[in-house]
Amino acid sequence: MPKRIAVLVSGGGTNLQALIDAQNRGEIVNGLLAAVISSNPKAYALERAEKAGIPHFVVSRKDYPSNQAMTQALVDKLRELNIDLVVLAGFMVILTQEMVQAYPNAILNVHPALIPSFAGPGCYGLHVHEKALEYGVKLSGATVHFVSEECDGGPIVSQKAVEVLPDDTPEILQRRIMEQCEWKLLPQAVSLFCQDRLRVEGRTVRVLD
């Protein structure tokens, strides 16, 4: 049985599209995109799911009194859908510990920087690339990691770097990192998980042959 994957989204869903495209190419081995869940009822990602024929749902933050209440509702929905792997793809709500406890080492997130640089609270979206450019780094990139209770602090599955060029704006750097790093790393990591080829040993993730 293929592992059932849920992708959690809040916006445009470019990383979701990368996963859909990878699935269509047969690159997500032993995995199935079984659900897309958005925290935002107007997210374009929901249209991408609709076009791809993937069941999609909204669990909106404003419908719950707290992040914790919303997280519990999400966990309930994921369990109801028999989900094996949760992928955070531009999901803009900070999930509370209930999610990690329900899915230990089974939640993947893609972060648009080389963790531990430019990570943690407040580092999301364009802010990450603004900080990288302000700092003057020569390389940036993306990281896929397991989600732990510490924001952006879980064990790292994979990383890929790109050069930061002299004329980069946050938007140009964001696009380069998406195209060259995020859209490649995330489907690869999801496929490895679905093949049971990722083993977490403390802070290290080993990729098994």
Image (cartoon, rainbow, N blue to C red):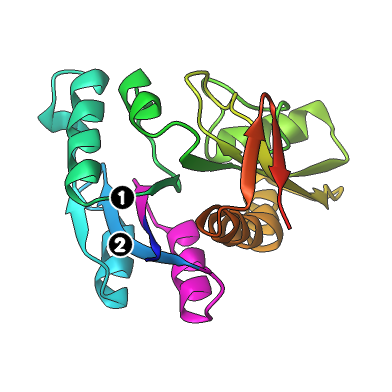
In three-dimensional space, the C-alpha distance between marks 1 and 2, rounded to whole angstroms, equals 8 Å
Q: Give the class, few, some or many, for how many residues have Cα within 10 Å of label 1's Cα (few <14, many ≥20).
A: many
Is residue 114 found left or right of 41 in the rendered image? right
**Is-magenta flag for residue 154?**
no
Q: Which residue is mark 2?
A: 34
Q: Residue sitting at 71 percent across and 61 percent down? A: 180
Viewer can see residue 142: no
Position in image of residue 164 (x %, y %): 83, 47
Q: Which of the two residues, 166 or 69, is positioned nearer the viewer here?
A: 69
Residue 153 sits in which quadrant?
A: top right
Position in image of residue 37 (x %, y %): 27, 50
Q: Which of the two residues, 106 or 109, is positioned nearer the viewer here?
A: 106
Task: Answer whether labels 1 and 2 touch (C-beta < 8 Å).
Answer: yes
Mark found first going from the N terminus, 1 or 2: 2
> What residue range appears in magenta?
5-29
Image quadrant in which the N terminus is located: bottom left
Under mark 2, the amino acid is Ala
Q: Which residue is mark 1?
A: 83
SS at mark 1? loop
Viewer can see residue 130: yes
Q: Residue sitting at 30 percent across and 67 percent down? A: 49
Q: Determine whether 62 is above or below 121 in the image.
A: below
Position in image of residue 141 (x %, y %): 73, 46
Is residue 180 found left or right of 52 in the rendered image? right
Under mark 1, the amino acid is Ile
Q: Residue sitting at 51 percent across and 66 percent down? A: 18
**Is-magenta flag for residue 28?**
yes
Is residue 13 found left or right of 118 in the rendered image? left
